[in-house]
Image (cartoon, rainbow, N blue to C red):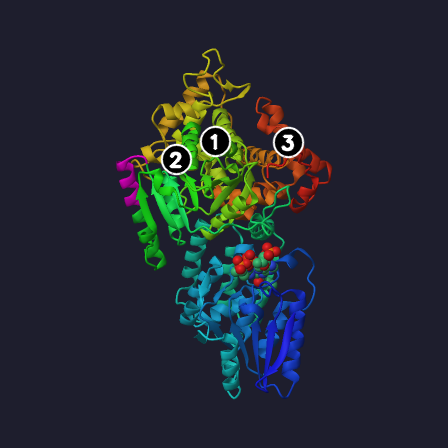
Amino acid sequence: MARYELVKRSVALITLTNPPVNALSSAVRHAIAKSMDHALNDPKVTAVVICGENGRFCGGADIREFAGPLRGPPLVPLLDAIEAGEKPVVAAIEGVALGGGFELALVCHYRIAHFKARLGLPEVTLGILPAAGGTQRLPRLIGIPAALELITTGRHISAQEALKLGIVDQVTEQNACEVAVEFALRAVAKPLSSRRVSMLTTPCPPDLDGLLEAVTMQVKKKARGVMAPLACIQAVRAAATMPYSKGIKRESELMATLFNSGQARALQYCFFAQRTAGKWTLPSGAQWNNSKPREIRSAAIIGLGTMGRGIVVSLARVGISVIAVESEKKLLETGKQMVIGMLERDAKRRGVSASLNLLKFTLSLQDLKDVDLVIEAVFEDMALKKRVFQELSKVCRPATLLCTNTSGLDVDALAGVTDRPHLVVGMHFFSPAHVMKLLEVVCGPRSSSETIATAMILGKRMGKVSVAVGNCPGFVGNRMLKPYLDQATFLLEEGATPEQIDKALEDFGFAMGVFRMSDLAGLDVGWRVRKESGLTGPDVDPKNPPRRRQGRRYCPIPDMVCEQGRFGQKTGRGWYMYDKPGGTNAKPDPLIQNLLEMYRSRYGIQPRNISDQEIIERCLFALANEGFRILEDGIAARPEDIDVIYLFGYGFPRHGGGPMFYASMVGLERVLERLEHYHQAHPDVPHLEPSPLLKKLVACGSPPVQKWREHIKTMHSHL
Ligand SMILES: CCC/C=C/C(=O)SCCNC(=O)CCNC(=O)[C@H](O)C(C)(C)COP(=O)([O-])OP(=O)([O-])OC[C@H]1O[C@@H](n2cnc3c(N)ncnc32)[C@H](O)[C@@H]1OP(=O)([O-])[O-]
């Protein structure tokens, strides 16, 4: 777990050996303690260098160990002892020094970083704080404002920025370990007292309280309801106002309040869920680590609407040449100008040159004959998509992968009109596609494992979090959205307002409430889908009761809003009013209030006071309930995949873990009881009827999320 060698006759080189990130597991901590003891007591040793194997210094505490009791030497006394030692210790930072790894570097008397190294204290993103002295040492080293920013955001910084801030002493393009050994030899004769960061006085800004207050406001606004950043601020205050010996106790007390909190559990779950999601597997045995992806050098996008443009940008900025196709000259020209503008702005922000030479714009599908992969992003119309896929089958070489960006149509039906159903897969991007991190890779029953592997890896290359899902209407994300949206509109009927519902969801932590989100996405999209599926519009039988469709409760209010030309932000009116079309400042609209009052009186609905608790329970439990059905149907392979989709595609707060983890945190028994209660009150809403899997899990004693798979007997997995 740590290798000990004597180099240059007098330097003890301690190499952490815990792949893949040299996390500070109990065994590693034990090995460091033993090695340091050896080094400090061996008279031949005059200096020490600490580095990590495989070019990675240290990824921090072993997060997997957080779930169990503390074993092995605790980190704080171990680190304090390194700093207090009488021989100079140099950290040779290659790869990453994160969390406890950064704190380990901070107790070394000198720090040498490779120019590609990244440093940071990301504990806050895991719901905790840097409790191995990080909140006490970093402010002493770089001052309160800079330390606050790094600790409350968890941002990683480059070696160059670390040098500017005074965190590292030298940045090198050579082997950091070799440079550190030479550095250590030169440091032997120098006094160490000024190098012990815990002994330094924290440089304090004149208006400390004002600064802390301003940062607290910022943090509360940005991360509503999240505890860890606020605790970080309190710990940094201690660094400014207390000696190290007291500050470290304060840090430890604050850590204790966070460590076992639901938020910390949720955020740590998210960390692992995100990494698990890429590990897809099919019933055939094909999976992420035994299926070879194709290399994609060139791609084509059909359709330069909002989605198509975002996809072109996502591909071009990772070096893939793209041919963009439109059906009309004017649309092509508009799309081209927008794509170029987006790429130029993106490149400027990243300080690189825009890869415009990779782009080609055309009106002819014939130009696609040699590309490796095509992503169709035309209008959400099955007949049109089928025509495109038939045409692609004729034009593209037989090995070209054909992908669709449909948000919910049958991927297998599209595969069926091609000459290569095994090379067809869904790549469902989220709008705006060059910003949103989620990619649902929709596996049709005939998609080959090579095709799935290629789409998954291509997503990763574009910086997306790719999740493999099965083929059913709406796949995972949009299928679950339906019961969630339904509950929100039913609550409107019963007496709530859009702003009340949005506030409850935003207080819960959603980036946007459901109505603000719908206004942003455009209300006409759902209206068109409802018309096509016969739920509204001229095809509805006039004898059909107005608030029932297809045997279940139906809320026509969204249709009424659209009938008034209120399509959301783009028209300046939707569930809210905006200053102008395209405006983003949502204000409650008295016309919507009138519409709701008239609607309720027309149908004799007595409005009632609805609590925030009911809003959260009905919206979120209906959402999770559909998630259980999706697991039963084999559309998602595991609850982590569903949660990752909601975290990255739908703004579910990370500190809630995602809908499935949230259900487990509330307690499955409670979720079942509340769903039964609401279903009894609303028997004409099938989405509120508890799913068989939820009942089964409760009957099995509500196992933790990670164990649900053992209870899912899927007859026909769609994955
Ligand atoms: C005492 C209190 C004070 C201290 C608190 C802390 O230090 S809190 C910690 C503060 N530190 C952090 O928050 C840093 C967290 N880590 C990272 O940000 C990234 O992993 C990375 C940038 C280090 C490498 O990125 P990359 O894209 O090259 O690789 P990748 O991300 O795919 O990971 C590869 C594998 O390693 C696993 N694993 C990784 N780290 C840890 C860990 N600390 N522990 C355990 N496991 C860890 C990861 O799950 C995955 O496992 P799998 O799926 O193969 O079984």
| 393 displayed left or right of 620 | left
The picture quadrant where one finds residue 64 is bottom right
Q: From the image, state whether disc 2 or disc 3 is nearer to you.
A: 2
Q: Which residue is mark 3?
A: 691
Amino acid carrying mark 2 in the image: Val
Amino acid carrying mark 3 in the image: Ser
Residue in the picture at 59% in, 62% down: 20
Residue in the picture at 37% in, 47% down: 322
Gap in angstroms between the C-alphas marked 2 and 3? 35 Å
Q: Residues within 10 Å of mark 2 (few under 14, many from 20)?
A: many
**Of the pair 400 and 109, the residue shown nearer to us:** 400
Furthest toward the right, the residue is: 700
Relative to 348, does residue 224 appear above or below in the rendering?
above
Residue 572 is at least partly visible in this image: no
Q: Which residue is mark 2?
A: 378
Amino acid carrying mark 1 in the image: Val
In the rendered structure, does residue 210 fall within the stretch colored magenta?
no
Residue in the picture at 53% in, 44% down: 452
Circle 3 — which element?
loop
